[in-house]
């Protein structure tokens, strides 16, 4: 069974640019979560999508947004990049909302210069 | 407000020694608690979870954790450390109502195993 996949694995952007990160959940999983893992800050919850709808979001500005597609894959968009957006962005998926277990992808390492 | 606190950002143990990684949570309702492990350049892998069943939870790779409500703790232990246990460990709590919950992670503890 294929795990959660994320693309790209690494990317470098300039301050002020926009970036789109992609996540494909495990087959049969309808929930997708996005986290930001900045150095020394642990994982910060960004967004949760379930069955195409945004269910919850963390304390991040509106320039962090995303969506979930009918096939349950998801995109995370970050506009007007700032230096402090440099981090590992992790995606996780799970079965429908009643499930406890999240399965994580390997992440996308974003560097903003 | 911080919901999960991991004491010690770095812990070193000798191979074969007891591993103890500390996690305290703050929650007004019975929580769902988790421990994850992250190896270098990889995502997180679930070690074990507490979902209000048995207070002593056994996970993968010989790890276990005990939920202690009186101490609001969920410490992770392993009787004998192995070199392959070197990684970063995260404690997490699930908070919120059904359909709108979120997972709150601690800042992580990096475990070093000395030969």
Image: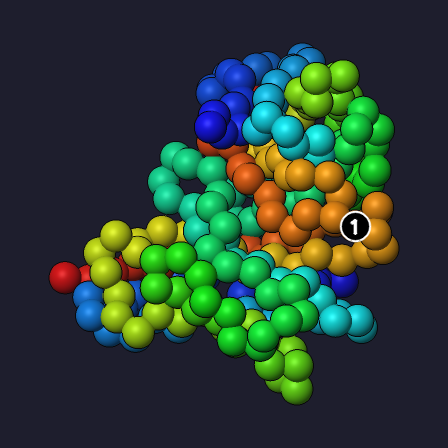
* Vertical comparison of A96 with A66: above or below: below
Q: Residue at x 30, y 56 (%)?
A: B85
Choose top left, top right, bottom left or bottom right for residue B18: bottom left
Q: Is B21 left or right of B85, judged from the image as shown?
A: right
Q: Position of residue B66 (x, y in %)?
A: 52, 76
For disc 1, the marked residue is B101
- How many marks overall? 1
In the rendered view, how is the structure colored?
rainbow
* Vertical comparison of B23 with B99: above or below: below
Return the residue nearer the eye: B110 or A99: A99
Q: Given the current orientation, which residue lies at the most extreme bottom position?
A: B70
Return the residue nearer the eye: B74 or A78: B74
**Circle 1 residues within 10 Å: few <14, some 14–19, many ≥20:** some
Q: Residue at x 76, y 58 (%)?
A: B95
| Secondary structure beneath label 1 | loop
Quadrant where the C terminus of chain A sits is top right
Choose top left, top right, bottom left or bottom right for residue B97: bottom right
The chain holding disc 1 is: B
Q: Residue at x 53, y 28 (%)?
A: A4
Residue A108 visible in this rendered orientation of the protein:
no
Q: Given the current orientation, which residue lies at the most extreme left position?
A: B115
Q: Position of residue B1 (x, y in %)?
A: 76, 62
Q: Residue at x 23, y 60 (%)?
A: B82
* Vertical comparison of A65 with B114: above or below: above
Return the residue nearer the eye: A5 or B111: A5
Q: Position of residue A39 (x, y in %)?
A: 51, 43
Residue B27 visible in this rendered orientation of the protein:
yes
């Amino acid at each position: 069974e294929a795990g959660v996949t994320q693309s790209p694995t690494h990317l470098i952007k300039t301050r002020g640019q926009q970036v789109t990160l992609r996540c494909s959940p495990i087959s049969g999983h309808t929930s997708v979560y996005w986290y930001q893992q900045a150095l020394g800050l642990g994982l910060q919850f960004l967004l949760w999508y379930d069955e195409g709808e945004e269910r919850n979001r963390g304390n991040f500005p509106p320039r962090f947004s995303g969506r979930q597609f009918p096939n349950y894959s998801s995109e995370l968009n970050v506009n007007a990049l700032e230096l402090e957006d440099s981090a590992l962005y992790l995606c996780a998926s799970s079965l429908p909302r009643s499930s406890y277990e999240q399965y994580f992808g390997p992440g996308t390492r974003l560097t903003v210069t | 407000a911080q919901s999960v606190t991991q004491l010690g950002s770095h812990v070193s143990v000798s191979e074969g020694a007891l591993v103890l990684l500390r996690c305290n949570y703050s929650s007004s309702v019975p929580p769902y608690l988790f421990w994850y492990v992250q190896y270098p350049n990889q995502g997180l892998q679930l070690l074990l979870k507490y979902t209000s069943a048995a207070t002593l939870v056994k996970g993968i790779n010989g790890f276990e954790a005990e939920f202690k409500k009186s101490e609001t703790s969920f410490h992770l232990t392993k009787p004998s450390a192995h070199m392959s246990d070197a990684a970063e460990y995260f404690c997490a709590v699930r908070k919120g109502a059904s359909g709108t919950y979120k997972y709150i992670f601690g800042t992580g503890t990096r475990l070093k195993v000395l030969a």
